[in-house]
Image (spheres, rainbow, N blue to C red):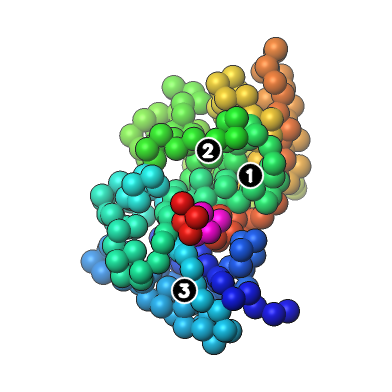
């Protein structure tokens, strides 16, 4: 297949690794690289992103193509409108004007956005909620966050929207790393499920996947931990449905790999809590681990047509 003459650089920045790609105008990756995230004194180096752009631009040239734009997905509190990362503990950044710094370094038009909103953009545009005017994307992994599309518009609130993992599921619940009690993340994140199982049994487990395996094998304690997580998810999703009325809720992240073991009871619990409200379809994410890069590519092409 012939490489298009114009490509974009898409970067999905994580605290442990960076996934980057050259993507065509349909946001389809044509070349992908993954590298460890580089730090100095605990702080991720912005220069590494510029080096990746240089590397991918050189590769594009070997394909006879030119890079036209840059999109980056970043964890934390991200003000995409201003191109500023307000805060991200994972990267050690506070008030980093990432768009201005990298635009000056690379000369490319660019957009940055929160990683979950970027994944949501991909799922809302090309994935499980493509074409839906009112949708929600919620990856459940080490943490939990959400992206919302309402009447065709994406909610950002200067970068503060979507921190659904810190909605209170039970005020008498376990302590959360944010300092509150009973947050959704304290019940239903992959790390919380593994931690709560270990606290109940005294047995260390290899993440939530092992708890799921024990659940499938009939472990009663794993079942109770799982039921608590489902109840917390249903409680918080009920509030989201009441406030924003999504037609579709897309569940992604590592926990979604449990499939109907997660989705079937969650549908039942959520439906039982709703009365006159619009009942959303609850579906698994379609784009998986590629959502961040695909969304970043969509951001890049938007940057070229402001």
- Give how far across and how far down residue 143 sits, in percent: 48, 45
Estimate the x, y position of residue 87 in percent, counting from the top left: 31, 47
Residue 234 at x, y percent in the picture: 62, 27
Task: Please identify, in this view, whether the residue under mark 3 or under mark 2 is nearer the observer.
Answer: 2
Q: Camera-side residue: 230 or 217?
A: 230
Q: Kindly identify the residue that appears in the image at 62 percent across and 24 percent down.
A: 245
**In this rendering, position of residue 50 left or right of residue 226:** left
Q: Report helix, strand or loop for mark 2.
A: strand
Magenta stretch: includes residue 301: yes
Considering only vertical position in the picture, is 10 above or below 89? below
Q: Quadrant of the N terminus?
A: bottom right
Q: Residues within 10 Å of mark 1 (few under 14, many from 20)?
A: many
Looking at the image, which is closer to me, 141 or 138? 138
Left or right? Give the position of 256 relative to 142: right
The residue identified by callout 1 is 124
Q: Residue furthest left?
A: 41
Give the residue at mark 3: 35
Position of 52 compared to 232: left or right? left
How far apart are labels 3 and 2 at the CA level? Answer: 30 Å
Which residues make up the magenta segment? 298-302
Circle 2/circle 1 CB separation < 8 Å: yes
Q: Residues within 10 Å of mark 2 (few under 14, many from 20)?
A: some
The dominant secondary structure in magenta is: helix
- Mark 1 lies on a secondary structure that is helix
Check the image and name the residue furthest to the top.
Answer: 276
Relative to 203, does residue 196 appear above or below in the rendering? Answer: above
Q: Which mark is residue 154?
A: 2
Give how far across and how far down residue 177 sits, in percent: 37, 40
Image quadrant of residue 21? bottom right
């Amino acid at each position: 297949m012939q490489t298009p003459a114009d490509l974009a650089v898409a970067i999905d920045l994580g605290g442990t690794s960076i996934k980057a790609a050259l993507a065509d105008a349909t946001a389809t990756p044509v070349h992908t690289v993954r590298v460890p995230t580089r730090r100095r004194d605990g702080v991720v180096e912005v220069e590494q992103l510029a080096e990746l752009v240089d590397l991918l631009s050189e590769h594009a040239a070997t394909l006879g193509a030119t890079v036209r734009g840059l999109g980056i997905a970043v964890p934390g509190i991200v003000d995409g409108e201003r191109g500023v990362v307000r805060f991200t503990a994972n990267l050690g950044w506070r008030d980093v004007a990432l768009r201005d710094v990298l635009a000056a370094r690379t000369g490319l038009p660019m957009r940055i956005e929160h990683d979950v909103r970027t994944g949501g953009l991909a799922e809302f545009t090309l994935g499980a909620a493509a074409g839906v005017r009112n949708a929600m994307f919620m990856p459940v992994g080490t943490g939990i966050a959400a992206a919302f599309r309402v009447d065709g518009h994406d909610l950002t609130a200067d970068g503060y929207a979507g921190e659904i993992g810190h909605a209170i599921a039970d005020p008498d619940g376990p302590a959360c790393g944010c300092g509150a009690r009973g947050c959704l993340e304290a019940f239903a994140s992959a790390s919380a499920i593994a931690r709560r199982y270990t606290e109940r049994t005294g047995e260390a487990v290899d993440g939530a996947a092992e708890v799921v395996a024990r659940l499938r094998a009939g472990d009663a304690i794993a079942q109770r931990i799982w039921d608590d997580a489902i109840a917390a998810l249903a409680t918080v999703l009920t509030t989201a449905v009441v406030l924003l009325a999504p037609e579709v809720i897309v569940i992604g992240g590592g926990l979604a790999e449990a499939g109907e073991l997660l989705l079937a009871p969650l549908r039942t619990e959520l439906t039982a809590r709703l009365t006159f409200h619009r009942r959303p379809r609850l579906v698994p994410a379609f784009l998986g681990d590629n959502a961040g890069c695909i969304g970043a590519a969509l951001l890049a092409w938007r940057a070229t047509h402001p």
